Amino acid sequence: MRHLVIAGAIAALAAVSAGPAQGQPAPTAGSSLGNVTLPRPVLANGQALPAGTYQVRLSGDAPTPAVGQSPEGSRYVEFLRGDQVLGRELATVISAAEVDQIAKGRRVPPGSARVDLLRDADYLRVWINSGGTHFIIHMPPA
């Protein structure tokens, strides 16, 4: 439950503005955001996603924004192996301008991704920086 509260707080902060960095094109539906290696099985959108390496791409689907939330504040991402989508999950989208207000500690450099096991292994955070736009995905263990 804690990860939902944290993700909600990040989404609320991101709602102010979730545009791309100055001079950087925003990732579009179908764009590859990068590759990540999940060290353990997790739940993605309620379904089991096995440990392993995945390509993450931006889905064309977007959730209905909450009142006061930017339409770009949350997007679905897909986890692929080859051409097969094995899972999808909601990502909080944070612009380069906002990441300094939200993130504490080390950040993910542009064109990179980081996977962290957080809160006594209560959930896995995938953080991808694609062209200055940050995608943060929280998934509980399977």
Image: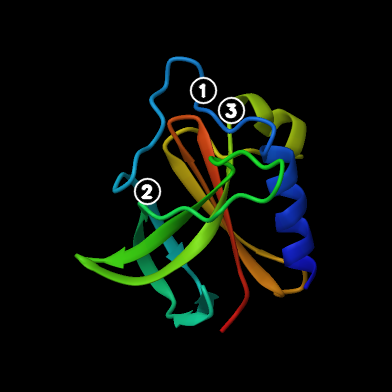
Q: Is residue 55 visible?
A: yes
Name the spot of residue 106 as percent of width and height, x first: 67, 39
Q: Residues within 10 Å of mark 3 (few under 14, many from 20)?
A: many
Mark closer to the observer (2, 3): 3
Q: Residues within 10 Å of mark 1 (few under 14, many from 20)?
A: some
Kindly identify which residue carries mark 3: 96
Kindly identify which residue carries mark 1: 21
Compared with 18, 29 (above or below) is below
Name the foreground residue: 137 vs 53.
137
Badges 2 and 3: C-beta atoms under 8 Å apart? no
Which element is circle 2 on?
strand
Which residue lies at the image location 71% right of the left edge and 47% below the top edge? Answer: 67
Which residue lies at the image location 43% right of the left edge and 15% below the top edge? Answer: 23
Residue furthest top in the image? 23
Looking at the image, is mark 1 or mark 3 earlier in the sequence?
1
Res. 34 mark: 2
Residue type, numbered disc 3: Ala
Visual colour scheme: rainbow
Name the foreground residue: 63 vs 107.
63
Looking at the image, is mark 1 or mark 2 earlier in the sequence?
1
Looking at the image, is mark 2 or mark 3 earlier in the sequence?
2
- Report, in whole angstroms, how far the alpha carbon at label 1 lies from the one at label 2: 18 Å
The mark total stands at 3
Name the spot of residue 40 as percent of width and height, x first: 52, 77
Residue furthest left in the image? 83
- Report, in whole angstroms, how far the alpha carbon at label 1 lies from the one at label 3: 5 Å
Which element is circle 1 on?
loop
Name the foreground residue: 25 vs 36.
25
Residue type, numbered disc 1: Ala
Compared with 120, 11 (above or below) is above
Name the spot of residue 88 as percent of width and height, x first: 43, 67
